[in-house]
Image: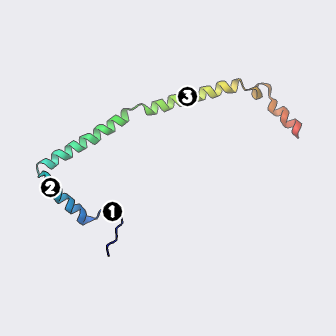
């Protein structure tokens, strides 16, 4: 009985490598690997150059500025009505 765990084992990897070698030949494989490596490097560079981190920082600073300006016009803080309501309840 064969148990499948979802992982590729040693024999499967060897079969895949032999098939790739037969299909592409020994001279073409390093060229393919080089192209794959360059593609991965280009992808990493593109994601690092994105301004997502800077955009998030800008949005966070704008939210903090908005919060501070709302706190300035908050009637509870201006007239200290919070303390008045607490003393009436108690």
Residue lying at the far bottom of the rendered structure: 1
Which sits earlier in the primary sequence, circle 3 or circle 1? 1
Q: To which residue does mark 2 refer? A: 21
Q: Mark 1 — residue?
A: 7
Decide: is 36 above or below 87. Answer: below
Sequence-earlier tag: 1 or 2: 1
Residue at (58, 29) in percent of width and height: 63
Q: Residue 2 sits in which quadrant?
A: bottom left
Q: Where does the N terminus fall, quadrant-wise?
A: bottom left
Would you say 28 lies left or right of 70 here? left
Answer above or below: position of 16 versus 57: below
- Residue 46 drawn at (x, y percent): 33, 34
- In the rendered structure, which disc, 2 or 3, sits on the residue that comes first in sequence? 2
- In three-dimensional space, the C-alpha distance between marks 1 and 2, rounded to whole angstroms, equals 22 Å
> What element does badge 1 sit on?
loop
Where in the figure is residue 71, as x and y percent of width and height? 69, 27
Question: Pointers 2 and 3 in contact (CB under 8 A)?
Answer: no
- Residue that carries the numbered disc 3 in the rendered image: 61
At horizontal 76% and vertical 24% (from top left) the residue drawn is 78
Instruction: Point out the image quarter for the C terminus.
Output: top right
- On the picture, is 45 further left or further right than 70? left
């Amino acid at each position: 009985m064969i148990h499948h765990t979802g992982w590729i084992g040693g024999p499967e990897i060897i079969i895949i490598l032999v098939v790739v070698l037969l299909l592409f030949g020994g001279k073409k494989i390093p060229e393919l690997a080089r192209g794959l490596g360059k593609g991965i490097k280009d992808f990493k560079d593109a994601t690092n150059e994105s301004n997502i981190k800077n955009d998030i920082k800008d949005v966070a600073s704008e939210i903090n500025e908005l919060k501070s300006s709302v706190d300035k016009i908050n009637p509870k803080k201006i007239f200290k009505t919070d303390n008045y309501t607490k003393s009436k309840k108690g």
